[in-house]
Image: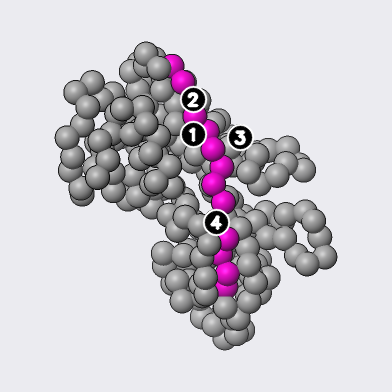
Amino acid sequence: MYSTTLHSSFPRVVLASGSPRRMELLSLLGLPFETLVTEADESYEEGLHPSEIVVTLAERKAKTAVEMLGTASHETIVIAADTVVAFKSDTSENFLILNKPANTSEATEMLRMLSGRTHQVFTGHTLLFNGHERGECFSEAIVTDVVFRDLSSQTIEKYIESGEPFDKAGGYGIQGGAAPFVLEIHGDYFNVMGLSVRWVGELLQKEGLWPGL
C-alpha cells in the first residue's frame, strides 16, 4: 500500500462496500479506511438513464451507511459506489441494463450480446462529508466504453465454466478471466472495476485532505 502524509485533521473514512475490488482500489490512495456493508435497497424506477441509476444507488448506500453508524458517523467521510453494465443495440435508443446473470443461459446470452461490440460501464460515486465542517455531498456518474473482440461459442462456454460470470454485472470481470476479451477501452479502467481512483483522489485533494502523489 502506498503511504502518504495525511492532513493533520483528516477524518475517519468509511467505504460503504464489501467489494474486495473497491477495497483494493481505494487502498491505492494510501488512506486508512474502514468498510461497512450496508445492504441498501438497490431497486430503482424504470426508465432511468444508467447514470441516474448509479448515482441514485450510490447516494442511497452512503446515506444508509450514515444511518447505520449513528452518532459514530460524526466527522466521517463516507465513500459509496454502484456500477452497472449497459448495452445499447443498433435498433434501440434505450439502454439495456445487464445485471449479474442468474444462470448459465443468462450468462451465455449476455456474453453473446457483448461479443464484437461496444458497451458502457457506468459507476456512480458518492463522497459524503458527514458531520464534518464541510457538510457536503458530492456525486458523479462516470462512464467507460469497453469494446469486446469477437468471442467464439467455445470461449464463452469455457469462461462460464470458470464460474466467474455469476457474481459480476454484465457476466464478466475485466480484471479476471475476461481480460483477454477486451479489445479497447475508452475512459477510466478502474471505473470498470467499480471505483474511479482518480475521482476520489482529485476530490479529496481539492478539499485539501489528500496531498496527492
Q: Which residue is mark 2?
A: 137
Q: Crowdedness of circle 2 by 10 Å Cα count: few (<14), some, many (20+)?
A: some
Q: Tag 4 or tag 2, which sits nearer the N-term?
A: 2
| In this rendering, position of residue 190 left or right of residue 10 | right
Q: CA distance from mark 3 to mark 4?
A: 18 Å
Disc 1 on helix, strand or loop? strand
Q: CA distance from mark 3 to mark 1?
A: 9 Å
- Which residues are the magenta region? 135-148
Q: CA distance from mark 3 to mark 2?
A: 13 Å
Disc 2 on helix, strand or loop? strand
Q: Tag 4 or tag 1, which sits nearer the N-term?
A: 1
Answer whether residue 138 is magenta in the image: yes
Q: Which residue is mark 3?
A: 56
Residue at horizontal 72 percent and vertical 56 percent from the top: 96
* Residue 129 sits above or below residue 106 on the image: above
Q: How many marks?
A: 4
